[in-house]
Image (cartoon, rainbow, N blue to C red):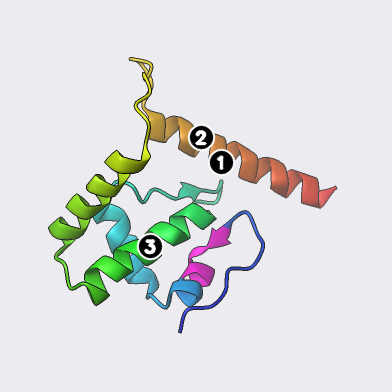
C-alpha cells in the first residue's frame, strides 16, 4: 500500500520503495529504462529522489501495472504527456539539460547536509 509523502526534499531508495510499494530492484531497473527517471546521487553514491521522481515512478507504475502497457508503451505515453506539458524553450548547444539539473540537485543536497551539521 502506498504511503503519503513526508515533507522532505530528498528521499533514499528504501523510503521510495515503501512510498511507492515497489522493490528497490524494480526502481533501479526502471531508472535504466526511462530516461526521464534520473535521480541525483549523493557524494557517497546513494540515489536521492525528489518528489517529482516519486510522482514519475507512480505514473510509470500506473502505466505498467494498471493499464498493462509494455515498457515501450509506457515510454511513448510519457513522451506524449511531456510534449503536451512542456513549453518549447531554446536550449544551449553545449549543455545537456539533465546533467545540469543533476549537478544542481547534488549541490543542493550537499549544502543541505552541511547546513544540518552546523
Which of the 4 image quadrants contains residue 107?
top right
Sequence-earlier tag: 1 or 3: 3
Overall secondary structure of the magenta stretch?
Answer: helix
Q: Is residue 10 left or right of residue 33?
A: right
Measured along the vertical axis of the image, is residue 90 above or below residue 72? above
Q: Residue at the location (47% across, 38% down)?
A: 102
Q: Which mark is residue 103?
A: 2
User: How far apart in space, not on screen, are marks 2 and 3 (Cα)?
Assistant: 21 Å
Q: The magenta stretch spans which residues?
A: 11-16
Specify which label sits upstream in the sequence, 2 or 3.
3
Residue 106's disc is 1
Q: In the image, which disc is placed on residue 57?
A: 3
2 and 3 marks in contact (CB < 8 Å): no
* The stretch drawn in magenta includes residue 82: no
Looking at this view, is 78 or 42 the one in front? 78
At x 39%, y 70%, the residue is: 24
Q: Secondary structure at mark 3?
A: helix
Report x, y in % for residue 115: 78, 45
Amino acid at each position: 500500500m502506498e504511503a503519503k509523502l513526508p515533507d522532505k526534499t530528498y528521499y533514499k531508495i528504501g523510503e521510495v520503495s515503501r512510498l511507492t510499494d515497489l522493490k528497490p530492484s524494480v526502481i533501479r531497473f526502471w531508472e535504466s529504462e526511462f530516461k526521464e527517471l534520473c535521480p541525483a546521487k549523493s557524494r557517497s553514491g546513494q540515489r536521492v529522489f525528489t518528489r517529482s521522481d516519486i510522482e514519475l515512478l507512480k505514473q510509470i507504475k500506473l502505466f505498467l501495472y494498471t493499464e498493462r502497457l509494455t515498457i515501450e508503451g509506457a515510454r511513448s505515453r510519457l513522451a506524449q504527456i511531456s510534449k503536451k506539458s512542456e513549453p518549447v524553450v531554446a536550449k544551449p548547444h553545449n549543455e545537456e539539460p539533465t546533467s545540469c539539473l543533476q549537478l544542481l540537485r547534488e549541490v543542493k543536497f550537499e549544502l543541505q547536509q552541511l547546513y544540518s551539521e552546523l
